[in-house]
Amino acid sequence: MTKFEMTTKANTIQLVMGVVFCVVWFSILGFISMTILSMGTPPVVFAFLGLFALFGLIPVWVVIKNGVSTHLLVNETHVISTRTPLIGSAKRREIPLSDYSGITTGTRVVRRNKHNYTLHTVLLVHREKTNNHELGAYRDVMAQHLRAEECCKQIGLPLLRTGNDGNYVKTEAEDLDKKFSERTRKEDISTPLSAFPKSNRYVLTPLEGGFMITRKYPLAAFWVVVLYGVAIGFFLSPLWQPGIVLLIVGTLALGAAIKGGQYLLLQNDRVITFQTFFGQQLKRLDLHVDDIEEIIEAHDGTQGNVQSLNICVQVRSDKGFISFAHGAKKEMREWVRKSVSQYVFARQKREEAGK
């Protein structure tokens, strides 16, 4: 019985461009060779032409490489991959499903049109990591998240996420749709909260039925003074053009200084995050507690091999991810994670008791 099936086609654009380049390249070399031959040029010249011909093998390799299509099929017992190259016969490989440990998420950087951008990938992970299979690649983290859960449910393997220590954190396929309160034991979050960590960047504001944490930009005012001061210096000199750039950058810093920051609001059975610029709300994301499945420390948008600056507290659901406390100290991230966990756990249990 087939559990999962997908086909990855050859890269048609690169395939066509490679073929065109090969035809043009070798046509030019052929024309030059015939011209030289008719002129009675010494044979040593052909040695140099041979070196130029080697450059033509590069697009030939690209054509052959991108002319491969892969068909992946997963049944009850095996993972069967079939690679069909542009030249030659198809190669079939059959590996027991038990050799695979699960499905994980990752990233890879792609360069196109002189720009680099990150793709968020979904991988079927081999225990020896020698026969991994990519099941999808997306520009959007939520698309990656939903695809990973879909593949786990279809194939019946756990979802593996990279923890802060570099090891995998496993979530069984049958647990992926469970709410946070169903995945978490009360004993794990019942430890009383310590005092809010001292910080010149984070501020705690108690509210009726909840609280709000504000992440400020403490150096914004300092940069406003510096940038505006240097800009005025340029305007008073013959070199006034750089002053315009500094004035624009200084205005952006001013926007961060005037009621600028990121906010995490927990109230009325909702977890809300938003940013402000010149006092106006931006990038607002609102999740009802009943939709929340996980509250963890994770890398923001990436998995593994990233700088610690990207580590944050993530509130995850199938409707969106809320990320907060990017690059904060460990004690601050732990306080935020535990306080949000207790809030969501209590509200979800109250909802269950009211049904």
Image (tube, rainbow, N blue to C red):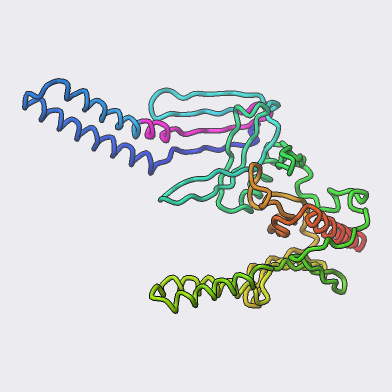
Q: Who is closer to the viewer here, 315 or 9?
A: 315
Residue drawn at 59 percent across, 40 percent down: 135
Residue 309, position as x, y percentages in the image: 67, 52
For residue 199, which quarter of the picture?
bottom right
Q: Quadrant of the C terminus?
A: bottom right
Residue drawn at 52 percent across, 28 percent down: 82
Q: Is residue 332 above or below residue 73?
A: below
Q: Is residue 125 above or below residue 220?
A: above
Q: Quadrant of the N terminus?
A: top right
Residue 274 visible in the picture: no
Residue 246 among those drawn in magenta: no
Residue 40, position as x, y percentages in the image: 7, 23
Q: Is residue 90 above or below residue 303?
A: above
Q: Who is closer to the viewer here, 331 or 105?
A: 331
For residue 31, which quarter of the picture?
top left
Residue drawn at 65 percent across, 47 percent down: 307
Residue 250, position as x, y percentages in the image: 55, 73
Residue lying farthest left? 39
Residue 99 visible in the picture: yes
Image mark count: 0
- Does residue 284 appear left or right of residue 188 in this picture? left
Residue drawn at 40 percent across, 23 percent down: 88
Residue range highlighted in magenta = 61-79
Residue 124, position as x, y percentages in the image: 63, 35
- Does residue 162 appear left or right of residue 60 in this picture? right
